[in-house]
Amino acid sequence: MILHIFRWPFGVTAFGLLVALVLGGPKAFVLVAVLAILEISLSFDNAVVNARVIERMSPLWQRMFLTAGIVIAVFGMRLAFPLLVVGITARMSPGEAIGLALNDAAEYGRRLHEAHPLIAAFGGVFLLMIFLDFIFEEREFAWLAWLERPLAKIGKLDQLSVVVALVVLVVTTTYLAPEPGPALVAGALGIVTYLLVNSLGKLFEAEQREEDPRRRPGPAAAAGRAGLSLFLYLEVLDASFSFDGVVGAFAISDDLLVIALGLGIGAMYIRSLTIFLVRRGTLDEYVYLEHGAHWAIGALAAIMLIGLGRSVPEIVTGLVGLAFIGTATASSALRNRRENAVLRNVTHR
């Protein structure tokens, strides 16, 4: 099953590394490999969250996620969107932004770094909303029970996630952003985008159940407009994860081909990893993994918002996410071992 699911990432990796070696030599080969590993490490928690959403989509929308979704992820979010950001912030036409990227990659990277506070504010607050909505909701299992259960209780207050996100946004933009006004607007748009996509999903799913009363929420349930809303949610989520990776990539290389190959390879693995987690039922087997992914998302949101005024190394971001994921996986395995031991004792009696 692994070879079947990861056949495209394996093929793209071989092709991308070969292109880098032929056109750029050993240095480009190494840089592409480094960027791909960095992208995967930064977005592993993205794959976990994606997997839980994918379970609610119909087979058609799951295929869309793997086909059209990967095109959007690689060419849209990691190439076209940065061009759009540079064009808007530098007041350049799309043609001028493309020309700058192709003819003066170093200057393009500098302009993208200048736009980083806006990117960080939007993406950081969007991810913060995902984290807050998760920890403020009561769940069957609690990983960090001493913290998650009290947070779930106070989470019964209506719209608490929005209130907390707005307070965090105002504080961080006021004290950290070089230009608080534009960053505040970008963060507010992040909250609006999250609420809009989330609300559309709930609306379309409700309409779908009304059309077919026998249908119940569950794996592969969302089709039609409900599936579309989940697809859009995943794309915005992927964009929020990719923003920092794109900006950070220019600290490693200013060669657009190297950046495109490295980030594209990483995006392919994240897509396939999402499907692998769904088909293996990993989130049901390792019950704390989803918790760890959301805490990692919360940490990434904090790092992005701190990045409004301070530079945080990409390796720190990746290691923090992997630490949460690894710890949650280990905790799940220990829980499964304890439950199996209890079950064996009961059976022997």
Image: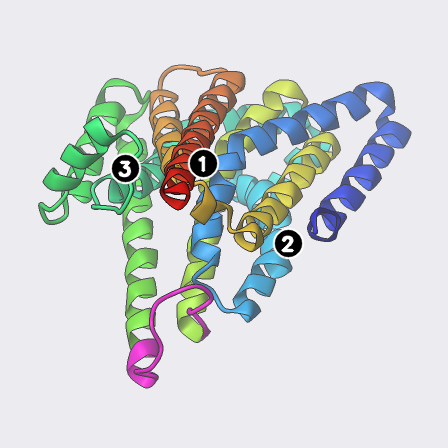
Q: Earlier in the sequence, mark 3 or mark 2?
A: 2
Check if residue 64 falls in the magenta segment: no
Viewer-side label of 3, 2: 3
Q: CA distance from mark 3 to mark 1?
A: 43 Å
Pinpoint residue 248: horizontal percent, then vertical percent.
Answer: 55, 24
Question: What is the crowding at mark 2: few (fewer than 14 residues within 10 Å), some, or many (at least 20)?
Answer: some
Query: Relative to 34, is 342 above or below?
Result: below
Note whether residue 187 is visible. Answer: yes
Which quadrant would residue 150 be assigned to in this image? top left
Residue plotted at (33% across, 51% down):
193
At label 1, which amino acid type do we have? Thr
Describe the element under mark 1 as helix, strand or loop: helix
Residue at image coords 46%, 33%: 333
Mark 3 belongs to which amino acid? Ala
Q: Which residues are magenta?
A: 208-223
Mark 1 to mark 2 CA distance (whole Å): 25 Å
Q: Front-most of 8 and 233?
A: 8
Label 1 crowd (10 A; few <14 / some 14-19 / many >=20): few
The one of 94 and 176 positioned closer to us in this rendering: 176
User: Residue pushed farthest right?
Assistant: 22
* Residue matched to label 2: 71
Residue under pointer 1: 89
The residue nearer to you, when weighing 156 against 194, is 156
Nearer the observer, disc 3 or disc 1?
A: 3
Quadrant into which the C terminus falls: top left
Residue 273, x across and y down, in percent: 60, 45
Q: Which residue is mark 3?
A: 142
Number of numbered markers: 3
